[in-house]
Amino acid sequence: MRKLSAAVLAGALMFTLAACGNDDGKSSSPSSSSSAAAASSGAAPGSSAAPAPAKESGDQSVLGKATVTQNEQGAKEPTVKFETPVAADAKVGARLANPGTGDELKEGQMLSVNIAPYDAATGKQVENADYKTPKSIKMTAASFAGGLEDAWAVMQTAKVGADVSVLVPATATGGKAQFWVLHVKEQKAAAVTWNKSDQAGDKIEVAEKAGAYTLTLPKGDDPTKLKVDVLKKGTEGKAATATSQVSALYAGARYANGVQFDGNFDTNTPAAFKLNEVIKGWTQGLTGLKAGSVVVLTIPKDLAYPTAAAGSGTEGALVFLVKIDKVS
């Protein structure tokens, strides 16, 4: 539940942007306290209005002359050539470098994306990049908001196996301008889907099918009290205390709009953290539960990120779906 420092923007792509934009090599982790909101509150560059779907969008002065050649059908880093150095005031742009031959990308699906970032000044690959480990990115406008709207426009024209080249200016990375290649490895249905109802109420509807969850949040004001809805009561091992180490799958969204800002259900890799090092709503809501529990936490602002700025993605009341894997 912690987002990266520096230029941290909404969505999984922006987690990578921040990681590659810094030289300190620090990574994201869900095991911190309420510093997440402060880290995510920085204003993001770029237009808030997403451009229409297109095979090229934004500034093409660099991208139009660049070449991106796949290696081993995307299994290895591509061979990329572009004119260097890229001007420091270059504007963001995106281009469909290779269209792909698989299924068309569908909104709402989860994408497995290999990301190859290059230093725009030298053309060399960024040192702390990890191309071989794909990132899970939801195919929604929100995942590309805050600076990569042009990439979203191009992704809507791509297929599985595609390469999308993106020029990311220094104002977005918080460090140096970069040239990215996004290789779409695969797509699948999202493990957690969020909906916002137009009906007023105070109950969150949860549907589960074959391990995939759909949560529908009611219309209305943000709740002011913590609510813990136990979907499945765990019986494995000891109950969590306020200082226990817990390993869990989770997905978090704003109560106001149902937009997910963090989670790991799609990677199916539990995150470990101590309950006294996370937001208060987690500490209070998960204490007393055992491994195997599946719960929905509705957390008011004062138990989440009280100082989160508007537009940060974590402001106001939050809702988490949590599946506890282990308590120690």
Image (cartoon, rainbow, N blue to C red):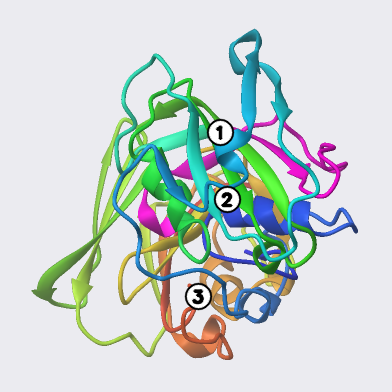
Give the residue type that dot 1 points to: Val
Question: SS class of the residue under badge 1?
Answer: strand
Residue that appears at 50% across and 66% down: 146
Whole-angstrom CA distance, mark 2 to mark 3, is 17 Å
Q: Earlier in the sequence, mark 1 or mark 3?
A: 1
Residue placed most toward the observer, 243 or 144: 144
Q: Earlier in the sequence, mark 1 or mark 2?
A: 2
Question: SS class of the residue under badge 3?
Answer: loop
Q: Residue furthest left?
A: 199
Circle on res. 113: 1
Whole-angstrom CA distance, mark 1 to mark 2, is 9 Å
Circle on res. 314: 3
Q: Mark 3 packing: few (<14 Cα in 10 Å), some, or many (20+)?
A: many
Question: SS class of the residue under badge 2?
Answer: helix
Residue placed most toward the observer, 211 or 44: 44
Residue that appears at 89% across and 57% down: 23
In magenta stretch: residue 117: yes
> Would you place residue 301 above or below residue 19 in this image?
below
Would you say the residues marked 1 and 2 are in contact, meaning their CB atoms lie under 8 Å apart? Answer: yes
Give the residue type that dot 2 points to: Leu
Can I make out residue 28 in this image? no
Residue that appears at 33% across and 20% down: 103
Q: Which residue is mark 2?
A: 13
In magenta stretch: residue 230: no
Q: Nearer the viewer, mark 2 or mark 3?
A: 2
